[in-house]
């Protein structure tokens, strides 16, 4: 009853100050009745009151002082006293212990009256007197950055390296890997010197055997993933049974760079999510030199539950580093990442919450499917759509059904925040940071699942842009394989025999196949044109038969699996394009050689993908709330 009275009183306080109308108050109270949450934050999230008015009125409601000026606040802070605390903990609890005067502690907070505030105070200052000063949540961030910026950025960049150096891609090749590569190169040169024909025959044989293993592996995964056609992990009944009052705060990280033309797509999409806006914590992660995107986002006038966080400049300049930085300020129990052009299905967050509830604490992440809204734009977008439809509708569910490590996609992966922090979050030196995180989390004993929800993105419509993006992904797979293959014994112990084989075939095998594909095709085309007998020595019967199997069945299977992908989403118009898969593979090979070159020359360089170049307008997803 006391809580209800407080809610009514603060509503009346907003009303008496002329900040809201009676109709707005009644709407907010109905909203609160349905979704729960704090009335002031609801009013702000609905856009009825400003951030300043919210915190100023909260201070008045609790009888505390409100200060808005940063310089005035800095004069209240004792830097030596503040330095005793962990900045990550202060960001989590939205509190700044400013100074201690005898038995009284001056506390700056943006969350007055909350349970978590008093949990922090009981932990650090039991039996003390407190002087509370209310400040905005953005001023909490500004002040913490003023005193702890170097610590924040150091943890964002080197956190994983410091806690688990064996999992950091900051070292591209370990000493052991360099030694093994040196030995293999030496033995290869000796073998070539004495018998080049037998060496090349052996090499072709190894490649062809790997092809067979890769083909059979994909087939098994596809059969296992096809079972999901008859299963729906989150049903409509599950959604209807969800008590919306119990929905937790959900953080959405949006890392962007030089993307002013598409930022409005995401803002509109997030406003249409079937999730209480008052329980959405959206953090737009911007780089210091990206004024254009900042101004574009600001022009869309996002609600108060959006925060703009500027990531301090440092190397490497990558998306995972920005996400690590944003994680420090996340308020949610769960967290997801969306790119600027993403359009998630409205019920995706609710499905994620239900999935975690069903998972019983075993899961660190659930991956939603990705697909494209401009699939029919040109040849490239059609092939991209076929590829993603197969990957997210068959291959990932297959990995999930067989209990194998799942390499996450770069967006729409939904995390348990505390578990994410526990495993060290993202590796800022890895250019496919989420694929690495999925393998690492599996090795730590956590499960990664998939949910039956889709986020629609913009498929690359230009070849050069596609190659830049794909080379970054392939380079990241190379990095991930090198990192986890450093200690094969530990990898085997962490993921088991099935996981060990799957890791090498999928993470290591994917770039390997892209690299050797053009060589094998060149040999075949050369023989087809010339009918030469010169290469017969390299293809004795055993090697020849395996090669023919790969040529015929391997290509057929790749085409068939892409054909299979169209049926689940009813993209029947794309069916003929599955026959053109070999052309698409050649593009992959071009990107793979670019990735290999960069692995040696600039391993941490983040190839930027340009968005907003499609001529297609994104569809509007309607929320049900």
Image (cartoon, rainbow, N blue to C red):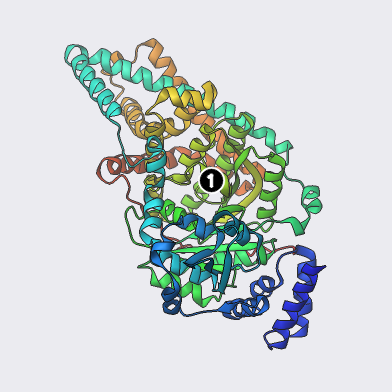
Camera-nearest residue between 485 and 368: 485
Kindly give the residue lying farthest to the front in the view shown.
102
Camera-nearest residue between 439 and 517: 439
Near mark 1 (Cα within 10 A), the count class, few <14, some 14-19 or many ≥20, is: some
Residue under the image location 78 percent in, 48 percent down: 238
Q: Is there any visible trace of residue 551 in the rendered image?
A: no
Residue 512 versus residue 162 in the image, above or below: above
Residue 432: % across, % down: 43, 44
Camera-nearest residue between 191 and 616: 191
Residue under the image location 35 percent in, 68 percent down: 289
Residue under the image location 60 percent in, 56 percent down: 122
Side of 217 relative to 508 (left or right): right
Residue 622: % across, % down: 69, 64
Side of 389 relative to 503 (left or right): right
Residue 147: % across, % down: 39, 64
Residue under numbered circle 1: 420
Give the structural element (helix, strand or loop) at label 1.
Answer: helix
Q: Is there any visible trace of residue 344 in the rendered image?
A: yes
Total numbered labels: 1
Q: Where does the N terminus fall, quadrant-wise?
A: bottom right
């Amino acid at each position: 009853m006391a809580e209800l009275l407080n809610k009514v009183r603060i509503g009346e306080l907003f009303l008496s100050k002329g900040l809201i109308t009676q109709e707005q108050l009644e709407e907010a109270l109905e909203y609160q009745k349905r979704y729960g949450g704090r009335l002031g934050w609801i009013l702000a999230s609905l856009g009825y009151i400003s951030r300043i008015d919210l915190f100023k009125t909260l201070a008045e409601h609790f009888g505390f002082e409100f200060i808005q000026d940063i310089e005035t606040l800095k004069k209240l802070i004792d830097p030596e006293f503040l330095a005793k605390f962990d900045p990550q903990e202060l960001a989590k609890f939205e509190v700044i212990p400013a100074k201690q005067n005898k038995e009284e502690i001056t506390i700056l907070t943006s969350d007055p009256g909350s349970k978590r505030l008093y949990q922090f105070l009981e932990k650090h200052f039991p039996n003390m007197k407190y002087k509370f000063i209310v400040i905005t949540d953005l001023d909490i961030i500004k002040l913490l950055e003023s005193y702890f910026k170097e610590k924040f950025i150091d943890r964002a960049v080197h956190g994983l390296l410091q806690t688990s150096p064996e999992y950091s891609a900051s070292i591209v090749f370990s000493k052991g890997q360099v030694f093994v590569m040196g030995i293999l190169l030496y033995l290869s040169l000796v073998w070539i010197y004495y018998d080049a024909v037998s060496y090349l025959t052996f090499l072709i044989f190894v490649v062809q055997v790997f092809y067979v293993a890769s083909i059979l592996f994909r087939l098994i995964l596809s059969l296992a993933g096809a079972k999901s056609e008859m299963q729906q992990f989150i049903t409509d009944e599950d959604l209807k049974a969800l008590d919306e009052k119990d929905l937790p705060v959900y953080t959405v990280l949006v890392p962007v760079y030089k993307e002013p033309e598409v930022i409005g797509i995401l803002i509109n999409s997030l406003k249409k999510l079937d999730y209480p806006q008052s329980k959405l914590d959206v953090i737009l992660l911007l780089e210091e030199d990206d004024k254009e995107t900042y101004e574009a986002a600001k022009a869309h006038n996002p609600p108060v539950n959006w925060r703009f966080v500027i990531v301090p400049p440092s190397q490497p300049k990558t998306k995972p580093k920005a996400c690590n930085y944003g994680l420090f300020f996340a308020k949610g129990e769960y967290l997801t990442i969306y790119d600027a052009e993403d359009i998630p299905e409205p019920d995706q967050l609710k499905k994620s919450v239900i999935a975690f509830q069903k998972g019983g604490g075993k899961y660190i992440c659930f991956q939603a499917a990705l697909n494209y809204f401009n699939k029919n734009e040109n040849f490239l977008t059609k092939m991209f759509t076929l590829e993603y439809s197969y990957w997210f509708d068959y291959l990932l569910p297959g990995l999930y059904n067989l209990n194998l490590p799942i390499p996450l996609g770069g967006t729409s992966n939904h995390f348990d925040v505390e578990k994410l922090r526990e495993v060290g979050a993202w590796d800022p030196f890895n250019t496919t940071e989420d694929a690495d995180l999925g393998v690492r989390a599996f090795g730590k004993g956590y499960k990664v699942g998939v949910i039956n929800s889709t986020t629609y993105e913009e498929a690359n419509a230009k070849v050069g842009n596609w190659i830049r993006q794909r080379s970054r992904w392939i380079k990241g797979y190379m990095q991930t394989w090198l990192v986890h293959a450093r200690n094969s014994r530990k990898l085997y112990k962490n993921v088991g025999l099935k996981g060990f084989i799957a890791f090498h075939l999928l993470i290591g095998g994917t770039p390997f196949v892209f690299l050797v594909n053009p060589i094998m095709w060149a040999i075949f085309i050369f023989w087809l044109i010339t009918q030469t007998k010169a290469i017969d020595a390299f293809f004795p019967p055993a090697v020849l038969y395996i090669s023919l199997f790969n040529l015929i069945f391997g290509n057929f299977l790749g085409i068939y699996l892409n054909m299979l992908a169209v049926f689940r989403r009813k993209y029947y118009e794309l069916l003929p394009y599955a026959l053109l898969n070999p052309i698409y593979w050649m593009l992959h090979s071009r990107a793979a050689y670019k990735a290999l070159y960069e692995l040696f020359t600039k391993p941490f360089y983040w190839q930027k993908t340009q968005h907003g170049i499609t001529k297609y307008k994104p569809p509007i997803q309607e929320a049900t709330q």
